[in-house]
Image: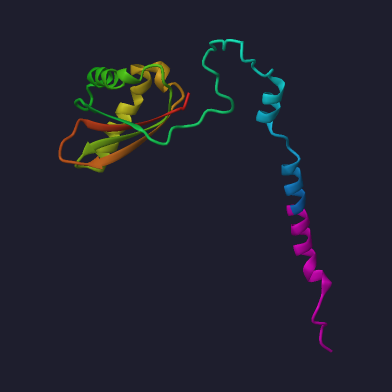
Amino acid sequence: MRAPRFNPLHLAGWLFADMLLVLALVAMGDRGDPLAAEAAARPAASASAKPKPSATPKPKGPRAVRNKPVTVSIDAAPGDRQRIEQRLRAATAAYRGRQAAFVLTFGRHADPGAGGAYAHEVNSLLAKARPEMFKGATTRDFWKGGSSSGHADIEIYFYTY
């Protein structure tokens, strides 16, 4: 004897998934618009009232990371930690007051091991060169092929605020 062609049990999973989708849509539609509530709470400005200067509004929500990096380069001999630190300070001087989220450093060398080691050395001195800028920043060491050593290209991804 053959099994019936239509078995309602086969539809149970689809029915459950559809109900879950409807519940999710209802829950999302139930949320109010926070910007509309703020606008309604503020009194309307009259024509005779002068606008008050206000401070820069503080951004709301979590910080984001800018999608375009700031790229700087330094040249200093491997092992010369003082010179690397000086070069880092000079290269990042224009970005004072900003905080880095993560940093990608590409050490140039013909040998991948030596290039990666130089990038690691540069990254280890970032927080010493600019503690306020690189505090808590994630760093990654990379090798970039080249015949010369003692050169690093640094990509710094800053927070939006």
Q: Is residue 90 above or below residue 15?
A: above
* Color style of the picture: rainbow
Q: Residue 139 lies in what quarter of the image? A: top left
Magenta-span inclusion, residue 16:
yes
Q: In this image, 154 relative to 157: left or right? A: left
Q: In this image, 134 relative to 111: left or right? A: right
Which secondary structure class fits the magenta region best? helix
Residue farthest along the left direction in this orientation: 147
Q: In this image, 21 relative to 125: left or right? A: right
Q: Residue 51 lies in what quarter of the image? A: top right
Q: Which residue is painted at 44% across and 27% down in the image?
A: 137
Q: Give the number of marks.
A: 0
- Residue 21: x and y in percent read 73, 53
Q: Nearer the viewer, residue 62 or 82?
A: 62
Q: Is residue 80 above or below residue 34?
A: above
Q: Which residues are magenta?
A: 1-21
- Residue 60: x and y in percent read 58, 25
Magenta-span inclusion, residue 107:
no
Q: Nearer the viewer, residue 10 or 84?
A: 10
Q: Which residue is painted at 76% across and 46% down in the image?
A: 26
Q: Nearer the viewer, residue 4 or 136?
A: 4
Which quadrant would the N terminus be assigned to in this image?
bottom right
- Residue 123: x and y in percent read 34, 28
Q: Residue 110 lies in what quarter of the image? A: top left
Residue farthest along the bottom direction in this orientation: 1
Q: Which residue is painted at 27% across and 22% down in the image?
A: 91
Q: In this image, 130 relative to 20: left or right? A: left
Q: Which residue is painted at 73% across and 48% down in the image?
A: 25
